[in-house]
Image (spheres, grey):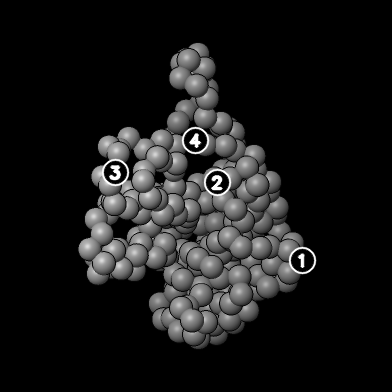
Amino acid sequence: MTAFQHNQICHFGLDEAPLAPGEVAIAGAGPGDPGLLTLKGGDPFIFGRGGEEAEYLIEHGIGFRVVPGITSASGCSSYAGFPLTHRDYAQSVTFVTGHCKGDRDLELNWAALAVPHHTTVFYMGLANAELIRRELQRHGMPAETPVALVERGTTPEQRHVLATLGELVEVIEREAFRPPTLIVVGEVVSLAETLAPAMTRLARQPDDALASRESVPGRVAL
């Protein structure tokens, strides 16, 4: 098991016209100054209930706009130092809810998720970690499959731990993980051991400070 603590700060801005009176914004990550804003922690249309909220607004005759964000799976994996796909490790990725509406049983196509060369990202999956481990292993996924737990990703309080599927529940309990935490399962997670230590820690700075750093040799932005 490998544990990491990050202190990276990013600020974002919305280049949007002001909302009309009575209009609602369903926004992804980033501050704004609209009349009424539903601010999500990632992308509003990926496990953000944005579709349900949009349907409600239509039903009540309220105009709205949707501002896309970066979904947690993408942001958290990047900040934790591993990709979700890689030609040598994972040729596909699946985003899965780990918690059903109304606390219903989590009924997933486990056989499709337990295949090799694939990455599965479980949103809101801490409470069902034992079920996730049991079902993936029951459908053929080895206990040694790498797993990443990313808590409060892309915030100054981010921390992530690399473990294996077989020890998933024990690591969650021992390290006292709390929501919001993503569970990422797949061989590609192992790249964090190589990529994360090599990543330059970046913090957004004023434009003049950034300009002075642009010519620094050896620093590359992907």
Indicate which label's residue lies in the foreground, 4 or 1.
Answer: 4
| Badge number at residue 154 | 2
Q: Which residue is mark 3?
A: 19
Q: Which residue is mark 1?
A: 174
Q: CA distance from mark 4 to mark 2?
A: 11 Å
**Residue 165 vertical placement versus 14 (above, below):** below
Q: CA distance from mark 4 to mark 1?
A: 32 Å
Q: CA distance from mark 2 to mark 1?
A: 23 Å
Instruction: Give me the residue at 69% from left, 67% from top.
Output: 172
Mark 1 residue type: Arg
Indicate which label's residue lies in the foreground, 3 or 4.
Answer: 3
Dot 4: within a 10 Å radius of its alpha carbon, few (fewer than 14), some, or many (20 or more) residues?
few
Q: Residue 203 appears in which quarter of the rendering?
A: top right
Tell me which numbered mark, 2 or 3, is placed earlier along the sequence. 3
Q: CA distance from mark 1 to mark 3?
A: 46 Å
**Residue 109 vertical placement versus 186 (above, below):** below
Tell me which numbered mark, 4 or 2, is placed earlier along the sequence. 4
Please, which residue is most extreme toward the right here?
174
Indicate which label's residue lies in the foreground, 2 or 3.
Answer: 3
How far across and down, in percent of the image, does residue 48 sit? 42, 62
* Residue 86 appears in the picture as rendered: no
Q: Secondary structure at mark 4?
A: loop
Q: Which residue is mark 4?
A: 11
Q: Secondary structure at mark 3?
A: loop
